[in-house]
Image (spheres, rainbow, N blue to C red):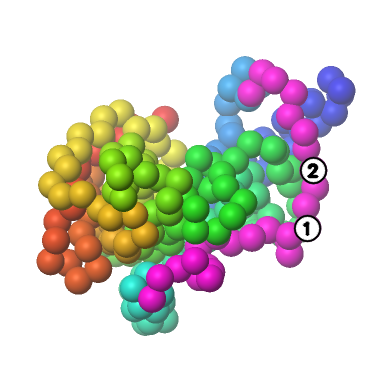
Amino acid sequence: MFKFSVRLIKGLMQVTAWLQEQPVLTNLLYRISGPASYLPSRDLTVTWPRAEEHKDFSLPNSSWSQSMRNLYNKYMELSQQGSWIRLPSYNATVTHFTEQCPNSAKPQVTTRLFTRNLDVEGLGFEYVVFYNQAEQRTVCIFQAGPYLEGSHGLIHGGAIATIIDSTAGICAICTAGKVMTANLNINYRSPIVLGSTAEVQCRVDKIEDRKIFLSAEIRNVDGQVLHTEATILFVQV
């Protein structure tokens, strides 16, 4: 078991070295570049999936509302024009390695991303993120399922904070590389109904040394209702 763990760590560090030489999109991956002490202390079950077994959760599914599909189609058209990029989304960070390094063996651990931890579509976070490199902006099309309820029929404030942090984090990572959230300040302006579609807009406001300052807001599909405003600080690590 010890020898296997050593080989696994060495393999991850080799993949890390390769990723650091790649374009901005690969910044979306968490780069495992520290010593073994940064890895989980508990034993992890490791499998070796084929690329075709990886599900991209950012693609439309049967739980998506028509409003969410319409916004998705809007940004896909913009992507074809070259201004925006749709970012793939998997349920485990290490799963991205197969797409970025198709000829290498990559492990997938049994942990899951918090926003992708349900097996049934439509119960939790349904979302897709687009990135505009020239404008240093991300847009997240978001639909909350019934498992994200706070007050009756409304999305929990913690779920709103999660989707803002995720959208801003992707923007910061695409812009500046590996980062960690240092501060998240949210103003809740109006509630969001469960099952409705909302649009999270996030942009980089300024960069000072290792600090990346961003702002974000959530609006309804036609942009007329402001649900949430936020400022976020990330620090490069």
User: SS for tag 2?
Assistant: strand
Res 99 visible:
yes
Specify whether 94 is left or right of 59. Answer: right
Q: Closer to the camera, 92 or 203?
A: 92
Direction from residue 146 to residue 190 in the image, left or right: left
Q: Which mark is residue 47?
A: 2
Residue drawn where x is 28% and y is 55% of the image: 193
Based on the picture, tell me whether residue 65 belongs to the magenta stretch: yes
| Whether residue 169 is situated above or below residue 56 in the rendered picture | above
- Determine the CA span between mark 2 and mark 1: 10 Å
Residue plotted at (12% across, 66% down): 224
User: Badge 1 local density, few (<14 within 10 Å), some, or many (20+)?
Assistant: few
Using the image as rendered, state which of residue 94 and residue 58 is in the foreground.
58
Q: Which mark, residue 85?
A: none
Secondary structure that dominates the magenta span: loop
Q: Do we see residue 138 in this rendering?
A: no
Quadrant (top left, top right, bottom left, bottom right) of the N terminus = top right
Task: Determine whether, in the image, residue 75 is placed left or right of residue 192.
Answer: right
Q: Which residues are magenta?
A: 40-66
Q: Say which quarter of the image contains residue 233.
A: top left
Total numbered labels: 2
Q: Looking at the picture, how far across and down is residue 124, in whole percent?
A: 47, 50
Q: Residue under label 1, please give it.
A: 50
The three-letter amino acid code for the residue at tag 1 is Arg
Question: Helix or strand or loop: what does disc 1 sit on?
Answer: loop
* Residue shown at the point (32%, 62%) measured from the top left: 196
Q: Amino acid at mark 2?
A: Thr
Residue 40 position, x and y percent, is 64, 23
